Amino acid sequence: MTADHAAHPHEEHESRYREGDAAAWDRPLRDTELYDPARRDVYNFIDETKVRYLRPMLPPAGNAIEVGAGSGRLLIRLGQERPYRLVALDYAPYSVRAVRENLRRSALPGDALFGDALALPFADASFDVVLSGGLLEHFREPGEVIREMARVLRPAGLFYADIVPRKVSLYRWAERTRMAHDEHLAKGIYESDFPKRAWARLARESGLRDVRIVSAGVYPPYTRPGFEQLLWRYPGFFRALDGTPVADVLGFFYMLTGRK
């Protein structure tokens, strides 16, 4: 699941599901989830921000998997950066449909599989890049998922996760009251409030080294008309705030990296 899963309230039909149900995430594909890198929306801005951050760290080739892939857009973008064999895994039917459609749109080869992030169906040390986007914050015990991701990562391979915690941020300012009183993004979808340092600790405890976590995403509130135009008009300004104390306070997601 990608940042667009966590940035906005979910559809009303999801309210009947129990926490952790795959069906809580199932719904029709949204236009914003379809691969179109020319579209100047917040999701492509975020994807491009992540790729810029990861580019110097990427292995030159090998296998790459996105766990909890959502639409798989970030995985596909990394596949355009390097000649990776792409694998996307999710337990929600809509996600597998979205990834397959986006692989078709990008003309990149890859596989989209149903699977459980807590029990990845792969041997140890199978992948050179293991990533997730907007996944870990939806587990009460995210260390279990990080350990599984680290297990399938090859020595010297790159681990990456972006995390959208339940915290006050400028972008999600309209949700601050809900976040203060409710640990669920929607019925069936838990949202963790782990602080930045806790995520880094979990990564280290999972056997990862060179762990680094950066606050990012100091963006205008999504309720402000024209906020996306502002992002694309002044991209350098907004991206310069990533990794600063301002982002620690007002950013809405973390970028967590490590090596096996």
Image (cartoon, rainbow, N blue to C red):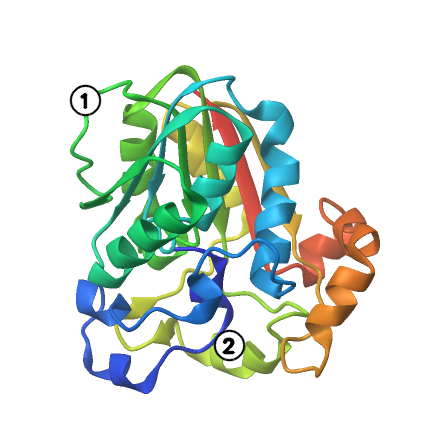
Which residue is found at the position 57% from the left and 53% from the top? 37
The N terminus - image quarter: bottom left
Q: Would you name the residue on which mark 1 appears? A: 123
Which residue is found at the position 64% from the left and 56% from the top? 45
Residue 14, image x, y percentages: 26, 79
In the rendered image, is residue 130 in sight?
yes
Which of the 4 image quarters holds residue 31? bottom left
Residue 224, image x, y percentages: 70, 82
Picture disc at residue 255: none
Residue at the bottom extreme of this rendering: 12
Q: Would you name the residue on which mark 2 appears? A: 180
Residue 232, image x, y percentages: 75, 61
What amino acid type is highlighted by mark number 2?
Ala
Classify mark 1: helix, strand or loop: loop
The C terminus - image quarter: top left
Which of the 4 image quarters holds residue 210? top right
What amino acid type is highlighted by mark number 1?
Ala
Q: From what the image shows, is residue 130 above or below residue 132?
A: above
Residue at the top extreme of this rendering: 155
Q: Earlier in the sequence, mark 1 or mark 2?
A: 1
Which residue is found at the position 36% from the left and 73% from the top? 184
**Observer-nearest residue: 189 or 1?**
1
